[in-house]
Image (cartoon, rainbow, N blue to C red):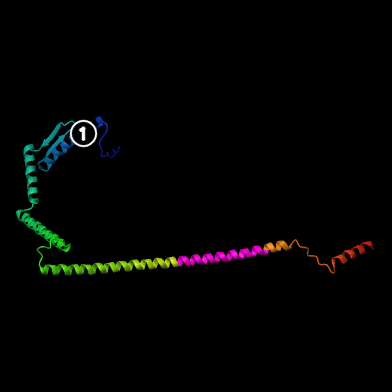
Amino acid sequence: MVRGKTQMRRIENATSRQVTFSKRRNGLLKKAFELSVLCDAEVALIIFSPRSKLYEFASSSMKDTIERYRGHVKEIRTENSPCPEDVQHMRQLAAGMAKQIELLEVAKRKLLGEGMGSTTIDELLQIEQRLEKSVCIVRARKMHVYNEQVEQLKAKERMLANDNAILNKKYQLQAIEESVEGVENFIVSENDDTSDVETELFIGQPKRRIKKGRHKRLM
């Protein structure tokens, strides 16, 4: 019989959970013992049950193994920690960046016209040149944006003109169709009016025709 794969999630049934814990705990302790014997490894295993009951195994001394583990972790942390030279270098870089930020803030305030009391004539000329250059760049960008907007408006105007032309053509065609339809309706109505008129032709005056007809009947 093939055993189904166990889903890795908490067992809800308390009895089943306790049975599974006992079986797997014993198996884990057995595997730890086999690993220490077969591979001559120093193994320490600590297990706390759901009820906080302690189960442990140590191939030698649990305390010595734990102390060895702590010393190993401490060595790893010491190896990964930066050396004093690196720390000093990082501090120098941080101080240099702080100085640059301060200089940039001062230059920014001067460009805004603030803190100009101790500024020399040369610095003022440099600031003026920078401002003029900035103004030229801003104006060039402004003209570029204006030109783009003008082109967009022209394109929109052309599109509206095309739409207007199409609508005018449709209106003219509709007007022609309506006028043709009106003429056709007028012709049809004229034909209907003339259909009631007597179309028989008579020769001579009506009175003579009546007398002649009476003469024939008398004969």
Residue positioned most to the right = 219
Left or right of 162 in this view: 41: left
Residue 144 horizontal/vertical position (percent): 29, 68
Residue 103 horizontal/vertical position (percent): 12, 61
Q: Relative to 10, say whether 216 is above or below.
A: below
Residue positioned most to the left = 84
Q: Relative to 70, say whether 98 is above or below.
A: below
Check disc 1 and give the amino acid type: Phe
The residue range painted magenta reads 162-187
Magenta segment includes 197: no
Residue 61 visible to the viewer? no
List the residue tagged with mark 1: 21
Viewer-nearest residue: 50 or 101: 101
Q: Name the element at disc 1.
A: helix
Crowding around mark 1 (Cα neighbors within 10 Å: few <14, some 14 to 19, many 20+) is some
Count of labels in the image:
1
What residue is rendered at 94% in x and 62% in y? 218
Query: Looking at the rendering, which quadrant does residue 177 occupy?
Result: bottom right
